[in-house]
Image (cartoon, rainbow, N blue to C red):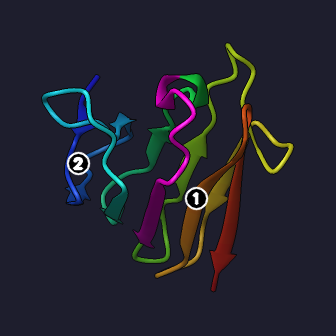
Amino acid sequence: MPSINGKTYTKIVTTGAEIWDIVPFDNFGNVISEMVIEADTTLGALTLNLPAIFTFDNFWNTKITIVANTGSTNPVGIKADITNPDTIGGQANLVLAGNFQAVELNVATSNTWYGVITP
């Protein structure tokens, strides 16, 4: 499964249904403070797996912004690491289904992501 490793900006263009892991750490294990992921799902749905919150080692000053360019067809699913169990505002996942919808994700607690979807 492909991953987005330690980049401040990434554009994903799907060619079918795809699953990617988000890894907000650089090559030295340092946390990236801000990531922007643009997801073009015109040709297939995308699922993005968030990292487990405990891997941040209490450094919670990270913002992950995901922008969906869906072409009004395929959604962008965002999943929390439920093995810990982490949630996104009390839910296991959220979906960006509208063209150019976006969500800004921040760590709220030791097992909860806070996310605000913008239309």
The answer, for residue 40, to whether it is visible in the render is no
The reply to whether the C-beta atoms of the residues labelled 1 and 2 are less than 8 Å apart is no
Q: Amino acid at mark 1?
A: Leu
User: Which quarter of the figure is the N terminus placed in?
Assistant: top left
Residue 76 at what x, y percent from top left?
A: 50, 56
Q: Identify residue for label 1.
A: 105
Of badges 1 and 2, nearer the viewer stands 1
Of residues 85 and 98, the one drawn nearer to the viewer in this rendering: 85
Residue 6 at what x, y percent from top left?
A: 22, 42
Q: Give the vertical position of 97 relative to 101 (above or below).
A: above
Q: Identify residue for label 2.
A: 15
Kindly state the secondary structure of the residue where label 2 is placed: loop
- Is residue 43 shown left or right of residue 78? left
User: Magenta stretch: residue 10 in it?
Assistant: no
Residue 39 at what x, y percent from top left?
A: 34, 62
Kindly state the secondary structure of the residue where label 1 is placed: strand
Residue 100 at what x, y percent from top left?
A: 46, 82
Mark 1 residue crowding within 10 angstroms, few (<14) / some (14–19) / many (20+): many
The residue lying at 59 percent from left, 31 percent from top is 53
